[in-house]
Image (tube, helix red, strand yellow):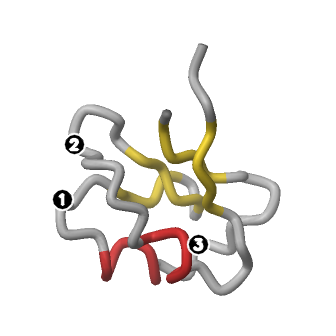
């Protein structure tokens, strides 16, 4: 399982960055990017996103 950001939906508002306790999210070209090595999969960023651009994704 991992947390992903839909770059087509993300507005780059930074709400997810503010709530991430692991400091695993940054903005690159005005789109949120999650560092999988820092992310603790707590999912706090998912409801923080006002445009629903962040979700859990199953990994193979």
**Which of the two discs, 3 and 1, labels the residue nearer the N terminus?**
3
Mark 2 lies on a secondary structure that is loop
**Residue 26 lies in what quarter of the image?**
bottom left
Q: Nearer the viewer, residue 22 or 8?
A: 22
The quadrant of the picture occupied by the C terminus is top right
Q: Which of the two marks, 3 or 2, is nearer to us in this view?
A: 2
The residue drawn where x is 35% and y is 50% is 41
Residue 2 is situated, as x and y percent measured from the top left of the image, at: 48, 38
Sort mark 1 into few (<14), some (14-19) or many (20+) by Cα contacts within 10 Å: some
Q: Residue furthest top?
A: 60
Q: Which mark is residue 22?
A: 1
Position above or below: 22 against 3 = below
Count residues near mark 3 (Cα–Cα under 10 Å), then give few for <14, some for 14-19, many for 20+: some
Query: Distance of mark 3 from mark 2, alpha carbons?
Result: 20 Å
- At x 81% / y 56%, what residue is drawn? 8
Q: Would you identify the image quadrant in which residue 38 lies?
A: top left
Residue contact between numbered discs 3 and 1, judged by CB atoms under 8 Å: no
Lower position in the chain sequence, tag 2 or tag 1:
1
User: What's the residue at 18%, 59% (across, down)?
Assistant: 22
Question: Which comes before the other along the chain, label 3 or label 2?
Answer: 3
Residue placed under numbered mark 2 in the picture: 38
Task: Identify the disc placed on residue 12.
Answer: 3
């Amino acid at each position: 399982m991992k947390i992903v950001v839909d770059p087509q939906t993300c507005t780059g508002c930074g709400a997810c960055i503010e709530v991430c306790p692991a400091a695993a999210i940054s903005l690159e070209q005005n789109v949120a990017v999650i560092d999988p090595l820092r992310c603790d999969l707590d999912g706090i960023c998912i409801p923080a996103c006002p445009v629903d651009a962040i979700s859990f994704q199953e990994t193979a």
